[in-house]
Every structure is written in C-alpha cells, then in structure tokens.
Image (cartoon, grey):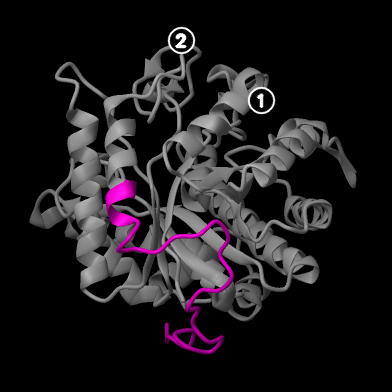
Amino acid sequence: MTYFMFATGIENSYPTVQGGRVRVDEMDKCGHYARWQEDFSLVRDLGLRYLRYGPPIHTTWTGPDRYDWTFADLTFGELRRRNITPITDLCHFGVPDWIGTFQNPDFPAQFARYARAFAQRYPWVQLYTPVNEMFICALFSAKYGWWNEQLTTDRTFVTALKHIVRANVLAMHATLQVRPDAIFIQSESSEYYHAASPQAIGPAEVLNAVRFLSLDLNYGHRVSSDMYEYLLDNGMTRDEYHFFLHGHLRHHCVMGNDYYVTNEHLVHPNGQTEASGEIFGYAVITRQYYARYRLPVMHTETNLCQGPAGDEAVRWLRKAWANVLQVRNDGLPVVGFTWYSLTDQVDWDTALRENNGRVGALGLCDLNRTVRPVGEAYRALIQAWRAVLPTQSVVLSLPLVPPGEGADQKA
C-alpha cells in the first residue's frame, strides 16, 4: 500500500559567497540551532509527520572520514522520539571548506563515504535526498557565478553537474549497503522555458533539454544527441557518461519535483531569460517530467510570500494542492506534497548572495514561531484529506519501477 506524505522542511541551505570567504547558513539565520525543539513541536502541531531535514554538512563532515555528530545526534534522536519521519537531506547547496567547491573531482567518492557513515549511525532512517536540487546547485554555483566556485562557463557548469550527480548516485549505492530498503527522493527543480518569439524557439529548446540533465544522468536516461555533444564538448568523458547509464538506481527512487512561480522563464532570441511567472503550472510541467522518467512522484517544495492582503500564500497553497490532485486523478503515482519551509527564510530575495537580513514571509510559521495563515490552512488541508489519502509515520514500501523499465530510451 502507498502512504501519502504531507511534509514540510527546515530550510538548511549553506552555500558560500564572496569567493568562499562567507558561508550563508540558513539554519543559523532562521534560528533553528537555538529553537530546534520548538520547531519539531510545530511540525507535530501542524499535523505533519514527514520533515525534509538534514545536518549542516559544513560542521558535521569535518574532514575525510571525520565527523562531528553532536548536533545530528540531538536532532535526529528527537525526531525519532517524536515519531517524525525525516527525509534526510545530506547536501544542500554547499560543501565543507576542506572540500572546496563542486569543481573538486574528489567530492563524489568522499561524499559517498559521508552518506555511508550517516546511514551507519542512524540505521533507522529510510528516506533520503542525498543532494538537494542538483541542477540548481550546479547552475547557481558554476554557470550564474552566484555561489561556491562562482564560475560562469558551460565547462564549469558541466564539471559541477557531473560531480554533483555522481556524488548523488554513489551516495545511494553507499546507503543501500547499510539500509537495503532505502528510498531516495530526488528533490529537483522542475523548470520550463517559453520562447518569447519564433526566433527564440531554438534557444528555448536547448534550455528545455538542459533542464533535464541532472535527472537524465541520475536515472540513466539517454540524453539527446545535442546534449551528448554538449556534455562531451564541455569536459564529460565517454566513460563518465556510461557510468551514469549503467550505475543508476532508479528502482529505489521517487522523482521529487519542486515548483515555484519562478520556475517558468521567458527566452529571448539571444538566449537571455527572464521570469515569466506561472504559465503552464505544476500539473503540466510534472506530466512532462513523469512522461520522461515514469517514476513515483512527490511534490517536494513550494511556497509564496505572504503579501499585504495576507492571503496570497493561502491561495497559492490551494492552487498547488489542486494541481497535485489533478495529476493524481490523471493517474500519476503521486506520493506526497510539501510546503517549504516550516519557518520564514532570510535573504532569499537575493538568492542568498547578499547578507541583508531581509525576512521572506514564506513559511508556515514566522521567525517568532507564530503560525501564519498558510500554516493554519495547511493544517486544515491535512486534516481534511488524511482520511482520503492514508498516511503513517514510516514508509515501508512504494510502487517503484522495476530496474529495467523506462531505462532504455535511445539518444
């Protein structure tokens, strides 16, 4: 039987900026280190039993095969005591200082050792997101020049991407050595690029192929001939590509997809993009991703800022949930929904590039831990739908795709 997961998350981004000199730690900015027990109480009070959550990698993973589990022992012990099921997020937009950046070729193998060590210490944990939003992490770090390595070429983007996805795949293998029934929920941004004019169709088609690269590699889906040339032209070797074709573990995976109003883009003839706002919406774009990968789906992130009217986030929650019900009613195997995050976030208006201390009213609760209207609406939604979509605190099995199904697409 499939159990539906209503979830939220603790925002735990920790990229570096300013040439690696400054680390942006959202758990610190949002007060979680001081108020983690209160945060877990709020999760339960809102009727939630699933939490996207992970230890801060930069203070936990202190060197090769060296770990400081102090904070993780406290928090994961409390999650277990409270019967909150973590969807464990091991890498969220950053790496420890000793690794450097995602350009480091040693990162994948070292990260797999970290994942195995975590699984050995917390063998009761079953659900994992080894690397959060692999595409966005590579894009913002190595193509936009915003985080970590702060580089801006196709070659640095492909280098970051291949290291990040390889790390994700190797971490899955390492975790399964400890927990053979582990399930991996790839929380990945679901994007779409709209051509602004006929002259922009070509650039938009390229971007709409690039958006799939992280999951194509992760799930062993053969890329198009254009994307194969793009990868090889920018430093991926044939052997590296074939590792992804044959090393995947799609039969242990749930395709987690994140959707925000910023996930759709307008493309101009010169390849420049701008935000388009919601045009297709979650349901249309999720069908595209499902048609490509044919895996169980979990809606793993959304939010909207509570504005002057006070009900903007509530209306977005209702729209997001209606989209989830629509694709579920169309027959897609949707296994969960997430409002991200539990509390408001800080400085995401500049994608964490500036330390302004500006609070975004995006959470189910504000930073004083007062439940926002969207939190009350989410609690009511969960209560209303729980009888229709059965839930329990631990996922024991999911209708996963057999190993060979859907993995033999031609380039």
* Whole-number angstrom distance, CA of label 2 to CA of label 1: 18 Å
The residue sitting at 50% across, 38% down in the picture is: 44
The label number, if any, that marks residue 356 in the structure image: 2
Please provide percent x and percent y for residue 324: 26, 58
* Direction from residue 80 to residue 12 in the image, left or right: left
Amino acid type of the residue tagged 2 in the rendering: Asn
Magenta: main secondary structure = loop
Residue 334 lies in quadrant: bottom left
Residue 397 in picture, x, y percent from top left: 55, 74
With respect to residue 197, does 370 lie above or below?
A: above
Would residue 80 appear left or right of 304 to someone viewing this image?
A: right
Which residue is at a point 51% across and 74% down the rendered structure image?
398
Q: Residue 213 location, x and y as percent?
A: 46, 63
Q: Quadrant of residue 322?
A: bottom left
**Is label 2 in a helix, a strand or a loop?**
loop
Which stretch appears magenta? 382-411
Res 137 visible: yes
- Write down the residue under mark 1: 20
Nearer-the-camera pick, 183 or 169: 183
The 10 Å Cα crowd at callout 1, few under 14, some 14 to 19, many 20 or more, is some
Question: Is residue 409 part of the magenta span, yes or no?
Answer: yes
Tell me which residue sits at (55%, 18%) in the image. 29
Is 90 placed above or below 120 here? Answer: above
> At label 1, which amino acid type do we have?
Gly
